Image (cartoon, rainbow, N blue to C red):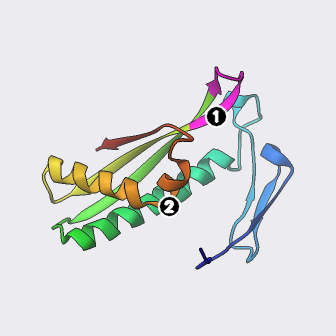
């Protein structure tokens, strides 16, 4: 399989460091949340960055499915909730995701089918399948 696109982000300093993309468009201070024992405050964290990427990718996949199905959808949006969880299996940590998906202009059953199809083609969904729990919720 050949790459159609490659990008890079350099992380330094772990959860209390910085992430910078190769083109400097992303340049964020990382701050560990208070809930994880960090100081909180101004900055982002890996879970927010993952949520942003997954939400955008899933909405793109959903709109691709909508075009292919020729569905009469007026608008879509995706809010990704990334959960930082205690992993009981190894006493470590893991993440889980809830995708809150809005599909306007169609009945609930059709919206659910479109969301399920998007979950099959979304690159983030493919990458996480079998690795983390992903819940799909229609909003």
Tell me: residue 130, above or below residue 118.
Answer: above
Asked which secondary structure carries label 1, the reply is strand
The question of residue 138 being in magenta is answered with: no
The N terminus sits in image quarter: bottom right
Q: Which residue is mark 1?
A: 94
- Whether residue 42 is visible here, answered yes or no, is yes
Q: Quadrant of residue 98?
A: top left
Between 52 and 109, which is closer to the camera in this rendering? 109
Between 104 and 136, which is closer to the camera in this rendering? 136
Q: How many marks?
A: 2
Decide if residue 68 is on the left or right side of residue 81: left
Residue 37, position as x, y percentages in the image: 75, 28
| CA separation in Å, label 2 and label 1 | 20 Å
Residue 133, position as x, y percentages in the image: 49, 37
Q: Which residue is mark 2?
A: 123
- Whether residue 45 is visible here, answered yes or no, is no
**Do tag 2 and tag 1 residues touch (Cβ < 8 Å)?**
no
Q: Residue at x 42, y 50 (%)?
A: 79
- Range shown magenta: 86-95
Decide if residue 51 is on the left or right side of residue 14: left
């Amino acid at each position: 399989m050949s790459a159609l696109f490659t990008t890079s982000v350099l992380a330094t300093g772990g959860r209390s460091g910085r992430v910078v993309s190769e083109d400097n468009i992303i340049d964020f201070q990382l701050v560990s949340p208070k809930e994880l024992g960090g100081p909180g405050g101004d900055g982002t964290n890996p879970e927010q960055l993952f949520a942003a990427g997954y939400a955008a990718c899933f909405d793109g996949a959903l709109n691709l499915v909508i075009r292919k199905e020729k569905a009469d959808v007026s608008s879509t949006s995706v809010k990704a909730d990334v959960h930082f969880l205690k992993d009981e299996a190894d006493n470590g940590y893991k993440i889980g995701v809830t995708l809150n998906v809005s599909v306007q202009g169609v009945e609930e059953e059709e919206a659910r089918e479109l969301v399920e199809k998007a979950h099959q083609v979304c690159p983030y969904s493919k990458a996480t399948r079998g690795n983390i729990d992903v819940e799909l919720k229609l909003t």
